[in-house]
Amino acid sequence: MAGIEWRRICCPVDFSEPARAGLAVAADLSRRLGCELVLLRTDAGSRVSDELPPAALQGAALGSWRDEAARLGAARVTLAHAAGPPEVGIVEFAAAEGVDLIVMGTHGRVDREHMLTGSVAESVVRTAPCMVLTVRPAAPAAARAAAG
């Protein structure tokens, strides 16, 4: 079986902690594979996060995420924006721009909100034209200790 050659990894950014966890994994993969990391900002649509900066500040915030990806060792980091709801914008960007892998954080919600609105990550996994790696934020140390 031939090896997988990932040249372009896309990491959607909504400025949340789960997205930051996805960024760490995506930057590490970019470093290890020597491939481009694209940080993708989409329009929030109806899924406005409390962690989302005002629209006027999102460009600067994305720039700080680019700097963080570089500090984490990403080989090359570029920024992109996709219009439309996140679950649509991410998939359309991946198809149009030849993305080999999408690495994205997931909130892991199983509550009523998830049942009513669905999950961006779940929708992307179902419809993306490439592989998708979902990343959950690390559990707090106290929770891990209690479970172990």
Image: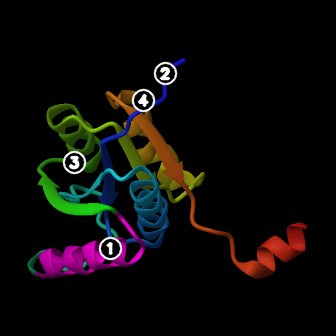
Give the amino acid type for the residue marked by disc 4 in the picture: Arg
Report the front residue among 41 and 24: 24
Give the amino acid type for the residue marked by disc 3 in the picture: Pro
Q: Which residue is mark 3?
A: 85
3D distance between C-alphas at marks 1 and 2: 29 Å
Q: Secondary structure at mark 1?
A: helix
Q: Secondary structure at mark 3?
A: loop
Image: 124 above or below 43: above
Q: Which of the numbered marks, if any, corresponds to residue 107?
A: none
Q: Secondary structure at mark 2?
A: loop
Expressed as whole percent of the image width and height from the top left, the position of residue 36 reads 27, 53
Going from N to C along the chain, the mark reached first, 2 or 4, is 2
Q: Which region shows up in magenta?
A: 57-74
| Mark 3 vs mark 2: in front | 2
Q: Residue at x 37, y 78 (%)?
A: 71
Image: 138 above or below 56: above
Q: Which residue is mark 1?
A: 70
Quick one: label 4, few (<14), some, or many (20+) residues within 10 Å? few
Q: Quadrant of the N terminus?
A: top right
User: How is colour applied across the structure in the image?
Assistant: rainbow
Give the amino acid type for the residue marked by disc 2 in the picture: Ala
Q: Which residue is mark 4?
A: 126
Q: Is there any visible trace of residue 90 in the rendered image?
A: yes
For the residues labelled 4 and 1, say whether their Cβ atoms are less than 8 Å apart: no
Q: Residue at x 42, y 50 (%)?
A: 33
Q: Which residue is mark 2?
A: 2
For the residues labelled 2 and 4, say whether their Cβ atoms are less than 8 Å apart: no
Q: Quadrant of the C terminus?
A: bottom right
